[in-house]
Image (tube, helix red, strand yellow):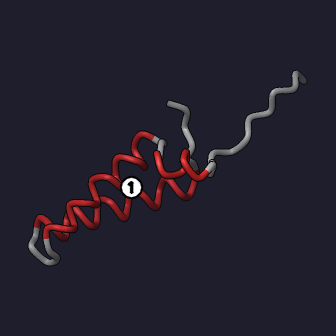
Amino acid sequence: MTSNVGGIDRVLRIVVGAVLVALALTHTIGAWGYLGLIVLATGVFSFCGVYTLLGINTCPMKDNHPT
């Protein structure tokens, strides 16, 4: 499993996922808010299966050239 979620994308996923779960726990929104667990997990583990299928990678490129 190679990381394909990075930077701002990762932070937004963690924040949005946590907010959705919190809203579901407080019954502010319906049970669909628990889908925030998936969003939260993709941010925590820096991997998104949908990104893999679509060929998207938001991780910064690593420089492979020696200095």
Classify residue 65 as left or right of residue 19.
right
26 or 41: nearer the viewer: 41
Label 1: few (<14), some (14–19) or many (≥20) C-alpha neighbours in 10 Å: many
Figure label count: 1
Classify residue 13 as left or right of residue 51.
left
The image quadrant that residue 36 belongs to is bottom left
Kind of residue at badge 1: Ile
Classify residue 46 as left or right of residue 61.
left
In this view, which residue lies farthest toward the front? 53
Image quadrant containing the C terminus: top right
Which residue is painted at 38% across and 61% down in the image?
A: 15
Which residue is painted at 53% across and 57% down in the image?
A: 9
51 or 53: nearer the viewer: 53
Percent from the top left, x then y, of residue 41? 34, 46
Q: Is residue 34 above or below residue 56?
A: below
Percent from the top left, x then y, of residue 24? 15, 68
Percent from the top left, x then y, of residue 57? 63, 48
53 or 9: nearer the viewer: 53
Percent from the top left, x then y, of residue 21? 22, 62
Q: Is residue 56 above or below residue 20?
A: above
Which residue is painted at 14% across and 74% down in the image?
A: 30
The image quadrant that residue 66 belongs to is top right
Q: Is residue 63 above or below residue 18?
A: above
Classify residue 56 as left or right of residue 47.
right
The image quadrant that residue 8 belongs to is bottom right
Which residue is painted at 54% across and 48% down in the image?
A: 53
Q: Which residue is mark 1?
A: 14
Q: Secondary structure at mark 1?
A: helix
